[in-house]
């Protein structure tokens, strides 16, 4: 365990207090684990810089990690994604996917997958319910192509499923929902590493937490 001098220790603890302010959304145990990892990384980095005879080693190490509020947000996002990756609840996964949408193209893709998958599942279930009240709802084919719902021209179209439309719609809804859930769980686990690595190449502790 790295032992810091009094001045460096004060700087590190001040930085950690700022990070802790941004970690209020997650549990205390998880927050303490994160702070311990950051403290360990800073200690190791300061020790390395000191061995290289770098002046103001603590300042350099802390500056390399960046703004404490930004770092805290990255850890909070990673925590939410990891929690979502262990959930089977569609609303939890979709909410987590929505939070990743602003993180870049990959995050937006995850959100769009969730939106399409669960939207298609909901649409199929609605179609199954509407079949009881609107008999024309079905899988129709005509010169205009295929329609899962009400055809644009009933006279020139043909219904393909008939009495099997309702069980087919329910089955389709299940396939879309379950497939989307499995895919989002996998993508969320991969997304847990997305909080960017600080420029100073943080130690294995931070990387291990993000991929845990």
Image: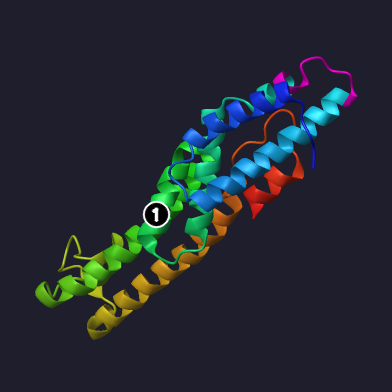
Q: Is label 1 in a helix, a strand or a loop?
A: helix
Image location (x, y in percent) of residue 72: 53, 36
Q: From which residue to which does the magenta span run?
A: 51-59
Describe residue 5's horizontal placement relative to residue 28 as left or right.
right
Question: How has the structure been colored for display?
Answer: rainbow
Q: Residue at x 89, y 18 (%)?
A: 53
Above/below status of 105 relative to 162: above
Question: What residue is pinned by disc 1?
Answer: 94
The question of residue 110 being in magenta is answered with: no
Image location (x, y in percent) of residue 97: 44, 50
Name the foreground residue: 3 vs 64: 3
Q: Residue at x 47, y 34 (%)?
A: 21
Describe residue 55's horizontal placement relative to residue 42 as left or right.
right
Describe residue 107's horizontal placement relative to residue 123 as left or right.
right
Image location (x, y in percent) of residue 88: 44, 67
The question of residue 53 being in magenta is answered with: yes
Crowd band around label 1 with a 10 angstrom C-alpha radius: few (<14), some (14–19), many (20+): many
Residue extending furthest toward the left: 133
Residue extending furthest toward the front: 6
Image location (x, y in percent) of residue 106: 54, 43
- Where, by quadrant of the figure, is residue 154 drawn? bottom left
Q: How many marks?
A: 1
- Where, by quadrant of the figure, is residue 150 drawn? bottom left
Above/below status of 170 relative to 43: below
Name the foreground residue: 166 vs 185: 185
Q: Residue at x 66, y 38 (%)?
A: 38
Q: Quadrant of the N terminus?
A: top right
Name the foreground residue: 112 vs 161: 112
Residue extending furthest toward the right: 52
Q: Quadrant of the C terminus?
A: bottom right
Q: Residue at x 69, y 28 (%)?
A: 9
């Amino acid at each position: 365990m790295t032992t810091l001098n009094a001045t460096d220790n004060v700087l590190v603890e001040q930085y950690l207090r700022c990070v802790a302010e941004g970690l209020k959304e997650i549990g205390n145990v998880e927050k303490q684990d994160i702070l311990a990892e950051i403290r360990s990384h800073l200690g190791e980095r300061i020790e390395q810089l000191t061995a290289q005879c770098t002046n103001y080693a603590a300042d350099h190490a802390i500056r390399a990690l960046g703004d404490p509020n930004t770092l805290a947000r990255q850890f909070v996002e990673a925590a939410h994604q990891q929690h979502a990756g262990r959930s089977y609840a569609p609303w939890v996964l979709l909410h987590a996917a929505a939070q990743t949408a602003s993180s870049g193209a990959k995050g937006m893709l995850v959100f769009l997958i969730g939106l399409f998958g669960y939207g298609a599942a909901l649409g199929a279930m609605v179609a199954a319910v509407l079949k009881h009240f609107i008999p024309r709802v079905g899988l129709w084919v005509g010169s205009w192509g295929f329609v899962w719902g009400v055809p644009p021209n009933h006279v020139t179209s043909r219904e393909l499923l008939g009495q099997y439309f309702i069980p087919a719609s329910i089955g389709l809804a299940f396939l879309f929902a379950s497939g989307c859930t499995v895919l989002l769980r996998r993508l969320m686990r991969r997304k847990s590493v997305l909080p960017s690595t600080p420029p100073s190449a943080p130690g294995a502790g931070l990387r291990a937490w993000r991929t845990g």
